[in-house]
Amino acid sequence: MDNLLHWDRIALASGALLRLRDAVGSRVVCVRGQVWLTEPGDPVDHFLHPADDHRIAHAGLVIIEATESAELMVLPAP
């Protein structure tokens, strides 16, 4: 997953993109702000607010965009 699977918080400025590969089973947790998340094979895009999370269910490239200044964590698959 591009070496981003860890417990550290990731800060994103408004409009910044984060690309995740090989992240199936990982969980994205929004700590602060708001992010938009889209993954291949999922017809629904997701908006995450503080304390929201989303488990990546499909292989391929996951795109996360900060719709405002945001902070998130990417937690590895169990």
Image (cartoon, grey):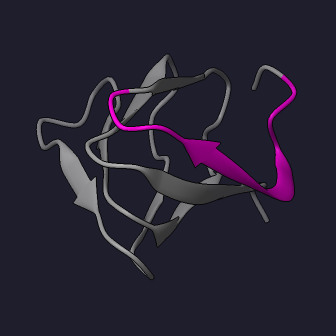
Total numbered circles:
0
Q: Position of residue 35 (x, y in %)?
A: 34, 49
In this rendering, the answer to whether 4 lies above or below 50 is: above
What residue is drawn where x is 37% and y is 63%?
A: 33
Location of residue 77 in the rendering, given as x and y in whole percent from the top left corner: 74, 56
* Quadrant in the rendering for residue 73: bottom right
Residue in front for this viewpoint, 50 or 23 = 50
Tell which of 52 and 70 is nearer to you: 70
Q: Quadrant of the C terminus?
A: bottom right
Residue under the image location 17 percent in, 42 percent down: 45
Residue at x 68% of width, y 25% of height: 22
The reply, left or right, for residue 63 in relation to residue 28 is left
36 horizontally vs 73: left or right: left
Per the rendered image, the range of residues in magenta is 3-15
Determine whether 34 is above or below 15 in the image.
below
x then y, percent, for residue 28 = 55, 57
Q: Quadrant of residue 19?
A: top right
Q: Residue furthest bottom?
A: 51
Q: Position of residue 55 (x, y in %)?
A: 49, 58
- Residue 41 or 20: which is nearer the viewer? 20
Quadrant containing the N terminus is: top right
Is 67 contained in the magenta span? no
Magenta segment includes 11:
yes
